[in-house]
Image: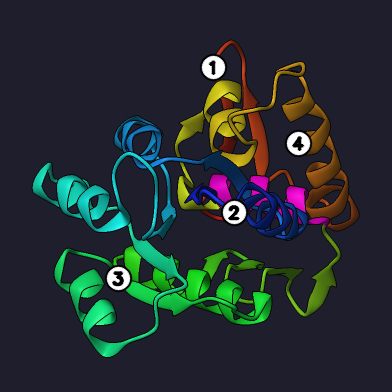
Amino acid sequence: MRLLMVEDEQRLAEVVAAGLKAEGYAVDLAHDGRTGLSMARNGGYDAIILDIMLPGMNGYQVCETLRKEGVETPILMLTAKDGEYDEAEGLDTGADDYLTKPFSFVVLQARIRAMLRRGRSAQPNVWRFGDLVVDPAKRACRRGDAPVDLTAKEFAVLEYLASRAGQVVSKSEILEHVWDFAYDGDVNIVEVYISNLRRKIDAPYGRAAITTVRGAGYRLAADGG
């Protein structure tokens, strides 16, 4: 899942982003309202963490502008302002949730997961492809009753493939969705993670859930291979 955090306290933003990346999210950062608005318009994010007190353009204005333009990405407002009127204004401008600083990182994660679940309400909470089970809320995977131990990034790649099961997904799409904007390494890193996933979810069980479509990308079989 790819997140955008718009926060002018750079140290806070970097610490939160590092924590979220460790959990397998791709996180891009913006430190002022106008940059955040531009990135939110064009970045294809799954959720946005948006501070209210921002230079250039405050969070209320950013949120309201995005909603007027038809951008429906879930937005969590993050602010040092504590009061029911501030919370009401944030929600009235189109935010999906509101969290006051200082906050618990565990609670932030839970709020993000809740927003993402609501954002993909048309999809099942748990994906099942034959005996392959992918559980985004628990960030867990199993084959039948056997748990499959995946790293955070391996799970993020599998989760994206699961969300597009039966479709061909290109390397660049996976890279864009699972790695953050700042990544400037080799696109072939995707091959490494696909290989790891095959070694963990396919090879021990005699399956071939993830196939390569030459010149196009990868496909996760809807029947689990």
Q: Is residue 45 above or below residue 172?
A: below
Name the residue that disc number 2 marks.
159
Bounds of the magenta segment: 151-161
Badge nearest the viewer, 1 or 3? 3
Left or right for 11, reference 201: left
* Magenta stretch, main secondary structure class: helix
In which quarter of the view is residue 212 placed? top right
Q: CA distance from mark 2 to mark 3?
A: 23 Å
Decide which of tag 2 and tag 1 comes sooner along the chain. Answer: 2
Q: Is residue 225 visible?
A: no
How crowded pointer 4 is (Cα within 10 Å; few <14, some 14-19, many 20+) is rated as many
Identify the residue at image location x=86%, y=64%.
149
Identify the residue at image location x=61%, y=14%.
214
Q: Could you tell me the amino acid type at mark 1?
A: Ala
How crowded pointer 2 is (Cα within 10 Å; few <14, some 14-19, many 20+) is rated as many
Name the residue that disc number 3 marks.
96
How crowded pointer 1 is (Cα within 10 Å; few <14, some 14-19, many 20+) is rated as few
Decide which of tag 1 and tag 3 comes sooner along the chain. Answer: 3
Q: Position of residue 207 (x, y in %)?
A: 76, 50
Q: CA distance from mark 1 to mark 3?
A: 36 Å
Q: Could you tell me the amino acid type at mark 4?
A: Ile
